[in-house]
Image (spheres, rainbow, N blue to C red):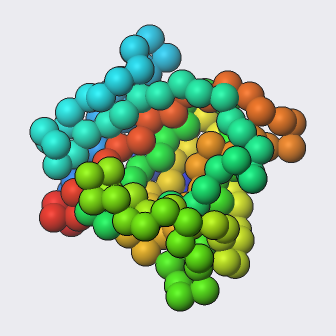
């Protein structure tokens, strides 16, 4: 997992692979506050962005997940949320087995559990071995969020 801010990414402190740079450039180039929720191709269906507005939820209503075919860049536009994380391991209990059509496996809980706060302008790059639990309310309680999730096929890395 990589975690950063768009401001730091623009400074070039980290040298990302070309497809990640392309995805971050897409995120910098758009004003998502003025765009409709939906699906936005970057490189067809191998790299695309999903813009969504929702209200964060309590942690027990959000289940950790992994993806096998795609890397996520979760970019927060407005609001704030906890993003839970742990490494993929045999200690995890599967809640919902892998669904190839949706490219997702859900787990009961994170083991061990780590959380970080996503704030506007921050992002997390999550690989197939990164178990993550998005959409969790901070201690201020459920609140509206605008977030873009870029999906990048692992074939492009």
Identify the residue at horizontal 65%, vertical 60% (top origin): 84
At 58% from the left edge and 61% from the top edge, which residue is drawn?
A: 64
Measuring from the top left, give residue 135's x and y in whole percent.
62, 43
Horizontal side of 47 relative to 90 (left or right) equals: left
Q: Which residue is drawn at 16% across and 43% down?
A: 45
Q: Which residue lies furthest to the front in this view?
A: 96
Q: Work out whether 22 lies above or below 19.
A: above
- List the single residue furthest toward the right: 140
Give the image location of residue 10, x and y in percent: 41, 45
Q: In this view, does 154 lie to the left or right of 50?
A: left
x%, y% of residue 3? 53, 59
Compared to residue 38, the image places residue 2 above or below, namely below
Residue 71 can be seen in this image:
no
Identify the residue at the far top of this view: 34
Q: Where is residue 79 in the image (x, y as percent from the top left)?
A: 67, 30
Residue 79 vs 31, above or below: the answer is: below
Q: Nearer the viewer, residue 36 or 95?
A: 95
Residue 84 visible within the image: yes
Q: Which of 53 and 80 is in front in this view?
A: 53
State the image quarter where residue 12 is shown: bottom left
């Amino acid at each position: 997992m990589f975690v950063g801010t768009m401001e730091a990414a623009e400074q070039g402190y980290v040298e990302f692979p070309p497809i990640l740079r392309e995805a971050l450039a897409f995120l910098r180039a758009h004003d998502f506050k003025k765009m409709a929720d939906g699906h936005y191709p970057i490189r067809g269906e191998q790299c695309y962005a999903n813009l969504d507005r929702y209200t964060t939820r309590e942690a027990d209503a959000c289940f950790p997940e992994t993806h096998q075919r795609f890397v996520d860049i979760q970019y927060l536009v407005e609001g704030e949320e906890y993003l839970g994380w742990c490494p993929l391991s045999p200690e995890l209990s599967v809640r919902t087995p892998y669904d190839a059509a949706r490219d997702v496996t859900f787990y009961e809980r994170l083991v061990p559990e780590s959380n970080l706060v996503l704030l506007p302008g921050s992002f997390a790059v999550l690989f197939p071995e990164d178990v993550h639990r998005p959409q969790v309310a901070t201690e201020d309680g459920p609140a509206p969020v605008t977030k873009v999730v870029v999906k990048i096929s692992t074939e492009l890395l």
